Structure formats: structure tokens, C-alpha cells
Image (cartoon, helix red, strand yellow):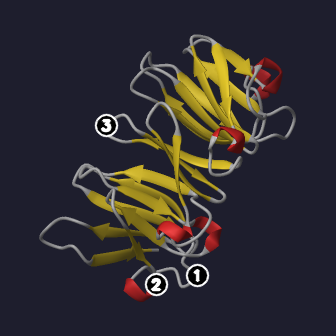
Amino acid sequence: TTADGLVDNRVVAICEDDQGRLWIGAAQIVSGGISCFDGKEFTNYTAADGLADDQVNAICSDDQGRLWIGTENGLSCLDDGGFTNYTTADGLAHNQVLSICEDSQGILWFGTANGLSRFAGEQFTNYTDADGLPGREVRDLCTDSQGRIWLGSGYSCQGVSCFDGRQFTTYTHEDGLVDTQNIVLTVYEDRQGRMWFGTWARSEERRVGKECRSRWSPYH
């Protein structure tokens, strides 16, 4: 807790970097921001240190050792002890960054409140409903073992989408998703290549292997 040095008690994101340190993102109750735990003590960073905003939504450590932080008011990259911030003025789809993932090619993907952003190191490429994205909100992101990007639509109520680099394929309750409201909050691939989706109603599994491409299994 904050009594032990944590930046804030409402923890919303955790990731481990290439040095084995834990990075913890907090929503703003008292101060908000991020904490780094090296196994002994916490080091905290807030907007006063250069973070884009103290309301943190997502954290991701990339293959270059950089830390990416999605906040309510922009995207931050922590590298060599300093922050670089990105907003819509730099090409980001929206300043409210809700989710982050890195694919097998080192490309970073950012889910926002108004579309998906792709960042290959120089500039952002954005995807919206005009490109086939089913809804505005991208609540969670996951890259699978086949190199595809899975997107949970969150409270835009559009189910889950799979992007293969060319087009989006969307699955809703009509396709077997258990949640009648199509609210998908979290996405994960396990070691067997099965995709798991946490919905507003319950969690469920979708097998995406060649032998059972359309099987859905709900769990209460």
C-alpha cells in the first residue's frame, strides 16, 4: 500500500521489465502515477516527473527495454530515465490510452477511447470504424502466436475483433460470444494457443487452432 511506498492504492496495471523489476500503474485516488519495485523498495513517478498524466490505464515493457504508459491524457515512453510524451498532436488516435501490446516484430499497438494506433518507431498509423474497427473503444489488446492482434471492445459493446494485418474480423453474441451485451474487457492467449475473453457476463474460451476454429466454451 502507500504505507509501504506505493504511489497509490488503486492499482490498475502491472508489468515486469527486462531487469525483473515490477512496474505498477495506479488510478488517481491520492496522487496516481507509476511505481517501480526492485524487490526492496518503490520508486515513484508522477506527472511532476514528466508522466503524461497521473491517471494510468496500461503499462507495457517493449523488447528495447522501454516502458510505455497509457494514461487518461496521452501516452508516455520512459527510456534512459526520461519521459517522452505523445498525444493526438503527434498522431495518436486519442489521448485516452486504454491498452498496449507489442507484437512479434516489435511493433507497438495502442488501444484508445477512439480507435487503434500502430507505432513502428517513427509515426502512428490509426485504425477506426472506417477501416473496419467495430467500435471506438479498444479496452484490451493481445497479440497471438500467429501474429494477429485481438481487441476487446469494452463498453462500446461490439464484442471482440481479430486483426490479421489486412482486415478486422469481429465476433459478437450472434457468433457464440456468451455476453449478450458484447462487452469484452480482457483478452489472453494461453500456452495451447487458446484465446480467452473476459466479458461483462463471464469468461469464455475460443479455440482458434486449425482443428476447431469456431468452438466457444463459456465459463461461469
Residue plotted at (62% across, 34% down): 69
Instruction: Write down the residue under mark 3.
Output: 105
Labels 2 and 1: the sequence-earlier one? 2
Residue at image mark 1: 181
Calculate the distance from the C-alpha at mark 2 to the C-alpha at mark 1: 8 Å
- For mark 2, what is the residue? 173
Q: Earlier in the sequence, mark 3 or mark 2?
A: 3
Question: Residue lying farthest left?
Answer: 211
Residue 163, position in %: x, y?
37, 61
As shown in the figure, which amino acid type bears the numbered disc 2? His
Vertical order, 68 against 218 (above or below): above
The spot of residue 220 in percent (x, y) is 47, 74
x, y percent for residue 13: 60, 40
Say which of marks 3 and 2 sits in front.
Answer: 3
Amino acid of disc 3: Gln
- Say which quadrant the N terminus sits in: top right
Structural distance between the alpha carbons of marks 3 and 1: 34 Å
